Amino acid sequence: MEQETLEVVSLNLVTQQTRILYETRVGRNPPMISPDDERILLTNFGTLDIVPMGEGLTQTLPLLNSGDRPGDWLSDDEIIYTTRDSKIHRRSLLTGVDVALTQLEAGTTLHFLPRALPGGGAFLYTA
């Protein structure tokens, strides 16, 4: 059976022109826009794909674990994400350095859906 694909498409509201930025298989997480509005971050079956909004090449980075789910951008080079073991981590897209930001407390089974607050100095998450 052939895999269905989805396209990430840019639509200019003034000119009504569309441009395909990226093509991915069905079932992936929604795209995240970088704080500088220049890039899109997508997960694509074991990788993080950083797609430029303009011209340029897609940068592909491996996920640390296949069950990891990106949450949001903190800064132009850092993302927060939920790990397979349901903790929230921060990862530098430049250096690959990964730091756990949350620990599960007694009675808490997971942390998920991290969302950066304006300025990138704090984030919300669901526990």
Image (tube, rainbow, N blue to C red):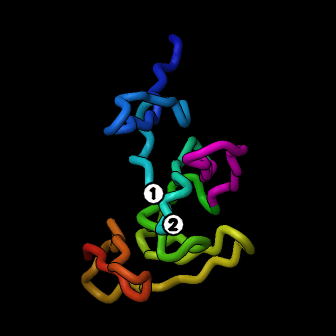
Span highlighted in magenta in the image: 47-63
Q: Residue at x 61, y 49 (%)?
A: 52
Check the image and report above or below for 59 versus 8: below
Image location (x, y in percent) of residue 92: 64, 74
Residue beneath disc 2: 36
Three-letter code, disc 2 = Asp
Left or right of residue 32: residue 22: right
> Do the residues under discs 1 and 2 have CB atoms within 8 angstroms?
no
17 or 72, nearer to the observer: 17
Residue 96: % across, % down: 71, 71
Marks 1 and 2: which is nearer the front? 2
Q: How many marks?
A: 2
Quadrant in the rendering for residue 11: top left
How dense is the environment of label 1, judged by Cα within 10 Å: few (below 14), some, or many (20 and up)? some
* Residue at 51%, 30% in the rendered image: 20
State the residue at coordinates (45%, 57%): 33
Name the side, left or right, on which 100 lies relative to 55: left
Q: Which numbered disc covers residue 33?
A: 1
Quarter-wise, where is residue 110 in the image? bottom left
Direction front: furthest residue: 14
Q: Is residue 124 left or right of residue 93?
A: left
Q: Secondary structure at mark 1?
A: strand
Q: Which residue is at a point 55% across and 57% down the rendered structure image? A: 38
